[in-house]
Amino acid sequence: MSSLWEQKLNALPMKSARDPRHIRRQRVIQDLFANTFLTQENQEQISKDVIELFPTLDARITKSAPQWPIDKINRIDLAILRFATYEITKSDAPSKVIIDEAIELAKEFGGDSSPSFVNGVLGHIVKEYEAEKAA
């Protein structure tokens, strides 16, 4: 017989690779990555919204990773950073959730150093953005 605590714990939904939000983020990252090579015709609206804000998003990324010019950042890492920065500044989702999801996407699509790079840059972006909101 399991305890009430174990029953409640087992009833919680587990995050999975089939989570619709994760799948949507994967598609957006793929759109943004593909767009770095060639302008894409069939994109989700959110991808188009992010692309329109590239200059603003890139400015935040550059400020948070000054030792890495935008043109030197791995393109998949840049796509992940752009989308996560967009979500941090334009959505109501908690920053921690956005960063966790970005790290998962970096593990899935990026290189060995991608998760720690994405985590560091986004951590700085969150601090800067929260300081702006507080001011």
Image (spheres, rainbow, N blue to C red):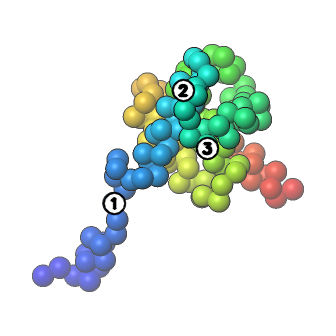
Name which residue type carries label 1. Met
Distance of mark 1 from mark 2, alpha carbons? Answer: 28 Å
- Residue 98 vs 92, above or below: the answer is above
In percent of width and height, residue 60 lies at 74, 36
* Label 3 Cα neighbours within 10 Å, binned few <14 / some 14-19 / many ≥20: some
In percent of width and height, residue 67 lies at 69, 21
Q: Residue shown at 70%/51% (left/top)?
A: 90
**Residue annotated with mark 3:** 46
Looking at the rendered image, the disc whose residue lies closer to the viewer, 3 or 2, is: 3
Looking at the rendered image, the disc whose residue lies closer to the viewer, 1 or 2, is: 2
Q: Residue 36 versus residue 80: which sits nearer the camera?
A: 36
Q: Residue shown at 80%/56% (left/top)?
A: 133
Q: Which image quarter holds the C terminus?
A: bottom right
Mark 1 element type:
loop
**Residue annotated with mark 1:** 14
Counting residues from the start of the chain, the first of labels 3 and 2 encountered is 2
Q: Quadrant of residue 92?
A: bottom right
**Residue annotated with mark 2:** 33
In percent of width and height, residue 57 lies at 72, 35
* Label 2 Cα neighbours within 10 Å, binned few <14 / some 14-19 / many ≥20: some
Distance of mark 3 from mark 1, alpha carbons? Answer: 26 Å
